Image (cartoon, grey):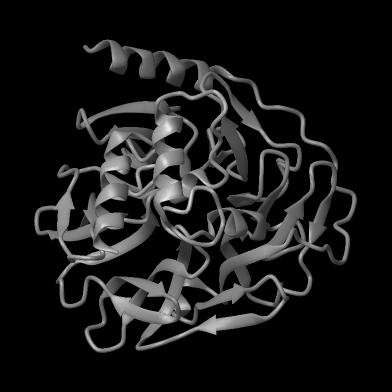
């Protein structure tokens, strides 16, 4: 057993042993709340089997758009590196298959058309270059679908399989730097949270409990959130965050209703779905109180929220290579970046993301080489 796997098992045992926190009492959700400025993505359906899901996008000005096309039952939308890059799953009208779609600047493309597989649960990598998802293949022996994890490159359409076993792997999402993938592993009627290392091609258990199922991992910054049963005897969903050693229930969790589909706004605030008022509605936790998003809720079930903040949008809006943020890419940017790489203490990058030409969320000499090449080509 590798040291890495052993460490994962220790963390899993610690998480499973954590006692449930006593939730605060939500006396009554407020009728409405003003969300932080940004884009909100979610889906709504009367029942999963009704095939009537609608996918909605609300912009910072409060306008709501119904994302539609040559598909039905769209859901589980997720943002990429901008609010104009979205991936989601839906049923192709022509082939009647679950497929992975991408919407870039309003244009929608089916990336898995006519694959012969079920393609579901897509999530972008941090750099927006790949999409992880679950792919279902028919197993004659089981007389059912078996689901494995897969990676898709939108630019080429290439798909590579990460797993191939009898367990169902579902709901994958990348960690913050894209080096690994969290997912739910279903085995023996229960589910656990596992981690797949994309370099070692190893997996380990992050949270596992023989009597409590856990699923729907979500990463925000350095925090991992997921949903699990309240207890072995109470199957109400609760949202927890795993900080590396502890699985910590959130204040709004309850033994009396479901809280699921974590959508972190930041470390203190979260959008989530809950049945505290009956069916699934969207709620916003501002760090101290819970508010119903009444303007968005309906008589259907509102689920699968994802949020892209306006602040992040402004931070990521830049001219490629323009590290001094003067509106254009030139020799001055190259000189500044080179000095910064040489650890000149007086050199600051006003837009460090503009220097990340390799799009891997780190800055190094490879970015400098690309910067020089692009300057020569101007």
Is 279 left or right of 291, judged from the image as shown? left
Rendered location of residue 225, percent (x, y): 55, 39
Q: Quadrant of residue 35?
A: bottom right
Is 123 left or right of 141, judged from the image as shown? right
Q: Quadrant of residue 223?
A: top right
Rendered location of residue 36, percent (x, y): 74, 58
Is 12 left or right of 253, judged from the image as shown? left
Residue at point 34% right, 72% down? 101
Looking at the image, can residue 233 be seen?
no
As drawn, 154 above or below 16: below
Is 238 left or right of 194, judged from the image as shown? right
As drawn, 80 above or below 356: below
Q: In which quarter of the image is residue 10?
A: top left
Looking at the image, can residue 194 be seen?
yes
Q: Please tell me which residue lies in front, 130 or 204.
A: 130
Q: Please tell me which residue lies in front, 66 or 118.
A: 66
Residue at point 32% right, 42% down? 367
Rendered location of residue 323, percent (x, y): 49, 48
The extreme left residue here reads 140
As drawn, 247 above or below 144: above
Number of marks:
0
Residue at point 45% right, 51% down? 354
Residue at point 35% right, 48% down? 359
The C terminus lies in quadrant = bottom left
Q: Please tell me which residue lies in front, 64 or 115.
A: 64
The N terminus lies in quadrant = top left
Rendered location of residue 98, percent (x, y): 29, 72
Q: Please tell me which residue lies in front, 330 or 17.
A: 330
As drawn, 46 above or below 281: below
């Amino acid at each position: 057993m590798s040291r890495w796997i052993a460490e994962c098992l220790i963390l899993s045992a610690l998480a499973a042993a954590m006692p449930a926190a006593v939730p605060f009492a939500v006396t009554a959700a407020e009728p409405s709340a003003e969300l932080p400025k940004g884009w909100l993505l979610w889906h709504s359906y009367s029942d999963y089997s009704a095939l009537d899901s609608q996918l909605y996008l609300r912009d910072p000005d409060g306008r709501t758009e119904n994302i539609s096309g040559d598909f039905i039952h769209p859901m589980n939308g997720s943002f990429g590196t901008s609010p104009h890059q979205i991936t989601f799953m839906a049923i192709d009208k022509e082939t009647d298959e679950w497929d992975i779609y991408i919407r870039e600047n309003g244009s929608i493309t089916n990336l898995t058309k006519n694959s012969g597989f079920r393609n579901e649960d897509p999530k972008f990598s941090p750099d927006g270059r790949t999409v992880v998802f679950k792919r279902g293949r028919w197993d004659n022996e089981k007389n059912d679908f078996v689901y494995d994890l897969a990676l898709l490159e939108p630019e080429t359409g290439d798909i590579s399989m990460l797993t191939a076993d009898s367990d169902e792997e579902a709901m994958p999402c990348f960690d913050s730097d894209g080096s690994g993938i969290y997912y739910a592993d279903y085995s023996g009627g229960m589910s656990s949270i596992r981690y797949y290392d994309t370099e070692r091609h190893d997996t380990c258990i992050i949270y596992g409990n023989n009597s409590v199922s856990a699923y729907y991992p979500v990463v925000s910054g350095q925090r991992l959130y997921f949903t699990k049963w309240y207890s072995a005897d109470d199957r109400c969903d609760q949202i927890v965050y795993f900080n590396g050693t502890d699985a910590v229930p959130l204040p709004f969790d309850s033994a009396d209703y479901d809280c699921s589909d974590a959508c972190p706004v930041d470390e203190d605030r979260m959008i989530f779905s809950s049945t505290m008022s009956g069916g699934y509605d969207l709620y916003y936790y501002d760090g101290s109180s819970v508010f119903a998003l009444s303007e968005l809720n309906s008589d259907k079930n509102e689920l699968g929220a994802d949020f892209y903040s306006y602040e992040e949008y402004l931070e990521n809006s830049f001219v490629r290579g323009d590290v001094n943020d003067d509106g254009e890419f030139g020799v001055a940017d190259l000189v500044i970046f080179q000095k910064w790489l040489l650890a000149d203490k007086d050199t600051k990058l006003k837009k460090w993301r503009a220097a990340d030409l390799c799009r891997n969320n780190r800055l190094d000499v490879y970015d400098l080489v690309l910067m020089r090449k692009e300057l020569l080509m101007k």
